Amino acid sequence: MKKMITVIIIVAVIILGLAFALGYYFTNYNRIGTEDYYVAIEKKGKPVTEKASDGETFTDYEYTLIGYDENGKTKQLKFTAQKNLRIGAYLHIYYKKDKGVTSYEEVTKKELPKKAASQLN
């Protein structure tokens, strides 16, 4: 009986450890403690070419857009993307006061909060 309880405890610890490790691995820490805004991509980004430390050049695309929170309040948001974003796309922007835009993801029109969606249309 003691062996069975020991085995159950070991299996439970392993499962909990794996769940914690996977949660840690898949968490985007740039989204923790942020304000949520929503924007629509209406034009191409401004190309900005820079040099990496190894001398290789790369191009990012800079966007300055008006974002709307779930209450319809506005904020001017400036961020860069590694590619030109799709015109007509809606983005969920993650913003921190001290860092600016820390992350973004494309969302569907159905995923937009009602007040933000009414401002973006």
Image (cartoon, rainbow, N blue to C red):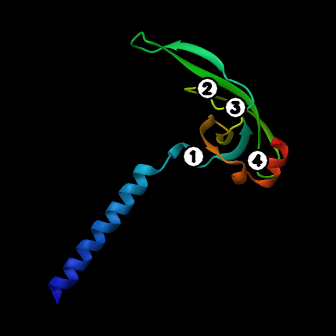
Comparing marks 1 and 2, which lies closer to the viewer? 2
Q: Position of residue 30 (x, y in %)?
A: 54, 42
- Which kind of residue does numbered mark 4 sit on? Asp
Residue tagged 1: 31
Image depth: mark 2 or mark 4 in front: 2
Q: Who's the residue at 73% across and 39% down the image?
A: 39
Distance of label 3 from label 4 (alpha carbons):
20 Å
* Nearest-to-viewer mark from 3 and 1: 3
Residue 110 relative to residue 102: left or right: right
Q: Is residue 28 above or below residue 100?
A: below
Quadrant in which the C terminus is drawn? top right
Q: Which residue is mark 3?
A: 87
Check disc 2 and give the amino acid type: Asn
Please tell me how crowded label 4 is: few (under 14), some (14-19), or many (20+) other residues with Cα within 10 Å.
Answer: many
Query: Tag 3: residue type?
Result: Ile
Across and down, in percent, residue 41 comes to 71, 33
Q: Which mark is residue 84?
A: 2
Disc 3 on helix, strand or loop?
loop
Marks 1 and 4, the one that precedes in the sequence: 1
